[in-house]
Image (cartoon, rainbow, N blue to C red):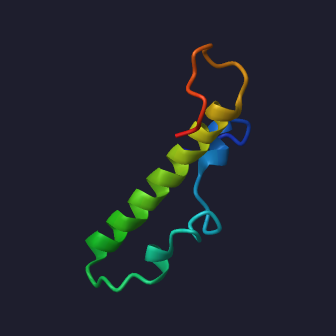
Amino acid sequence: MMQNRDDPRWQNAPTPGTTAPFCKLAICTERRARVINAFIGLANAAIVTRRPLAEAWTTDNRWDDRPARRP
């Protein structure tokens, strides 16, 4: 199924540039493919989850008694 570029979810796809801060992936010494794929999947899940959370904390249309600091 082809993704629509007008869909806002299109921007959340992890690219090689977004995985660069995860140094564990660059120096992975594991030989088992299942473990390597699990690390990559975990990093991609963190990348995809982090962006909407960051955008939600910076928007003004939030609740009134929101915590003062970001998580």
Q: State which quadrant residue 15 falls in.
A: bottom right
Locate residue 49, reporting x and y percent. Answer: 51, 44
Q: Quadrant of the N terminus?
A: top right
Residue 7 horizontal side relative to residue 52, left or right? right
Residue at (60% x, 68% y) in the render: 16
Residue 36 seen anywhere in this rendered image of the structure? yes
Residue at (26% x, 79% y) in the render: 32
Q: State which quadrant residue 41 falls in.
A: bottom left
Residue 2 seen anywhere in this rendered image of the structure? no
Figure check: 6 above or below 31: above
Figure check: 41 above or below 10: below
Locate residue 35, reporting x and y percent. Answer: 28, 71
Locate residue 27, reporting x and y percent. Answer: 44, 84
Residue at (51% x, 69% y) in the render: 22
Which residue is farthest front? 68
Count of marks placed on residues:
0
Locate residue 64, reporting x and y percent. Answer: 62, 13
Q: State which quadrant residue 54 falls in.
A: top right
Figure check: 26 above or below 60: below
Q: Nearer the viewer, residue 46 or 70?
A: 70
Residue 42 horizontal side relative to residue 11, left or right? left
Q: Nearer the viewer, residue 68 or 15?
A: 68
Q: Nearer the viewer, residue 54 or 16?
A: 54
Residue at (57% x, 38% y) in the render: 53
